[in-house]
Image: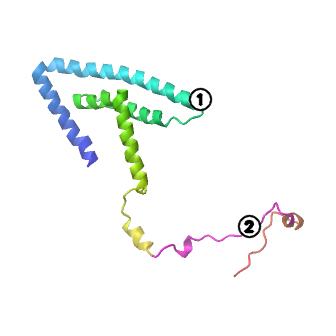
Amino acid sequence: MPLFIIFIVIPVVEILLLIKVGELIGGWYTVGLVLLSAFIGVNMLRHQGLATLTRARAKLDQGEMPIGEMGDGILIAVGGALLITPGFFTDFLGFCCLIPLTRHLFVKNLAKGFMGWMQRGGKAQFHYSQYEQRNQGGARRDDVIDGDYVDLGSKEGKQGGDETRLPPRSKQ
């Protein structure tokens, strides 16, 4: 369903918005407005990206993990991609990713969703019918690896002569 929204619904909404705005203010003004929003967005992207990078670098210098800045950086990159895409709806979403207040709301909601997913088990929902049928009896015997070892650091290993040779395996 999300791919349907991304590749079908959003372009249709963009086309409808471009047509409506073009009818209201004219075609060339609409093109100019789209180019102006892209120009403003690229400048905001550069400013917000550098500010986030500076904050992340400061946290790293203090020995802290810049987790919040990493989330900000991802949303800034997404916002930049949305602003480069022509259209008003994607520009709106892109500006929301670049404005710190709305970006922090996005990061907060994404983190909450991720934590909920992790608490539910963090497992992807895949269906392995053949795998499940084959392994319903529990662990198979051929999944167990048997091995012997010799501690070469012990006194017995050093007194035994050839330290690199393992003793013969006893059959049980």
> In the image, 90: left or right of 104?
left
Q: Nearer the viewer, residue 156 or 86?
A: 156
* Residue type marked 2: Tyr
Q: Name the residue under label 1.
A: 61
Task: Tell me where residue 160 appears, x and y as whole percent.
Answer: 87, 68
Q: Does the magenta stretch include residue 145?
A: yes
Q: Residue at x 24, y 22 (%)?
A: 34
The residue shown at (43%, 52%) is 118
Q: Where does the magenta region start and end?
A: 137-155
* Towards the viewer: 156 or 70: 70
Q: In which quarter of the image is residue 104?
A: top left
The earlier-in-sequence mark between 2 and 1 is 1
Mark 2 element type: loop
Up-down relation of residue 90 to residue 129 (above or below): above
Quarter residue 93 falls in:
top left
Residue of label 2: 149
The numbered disc on residue 144 is none
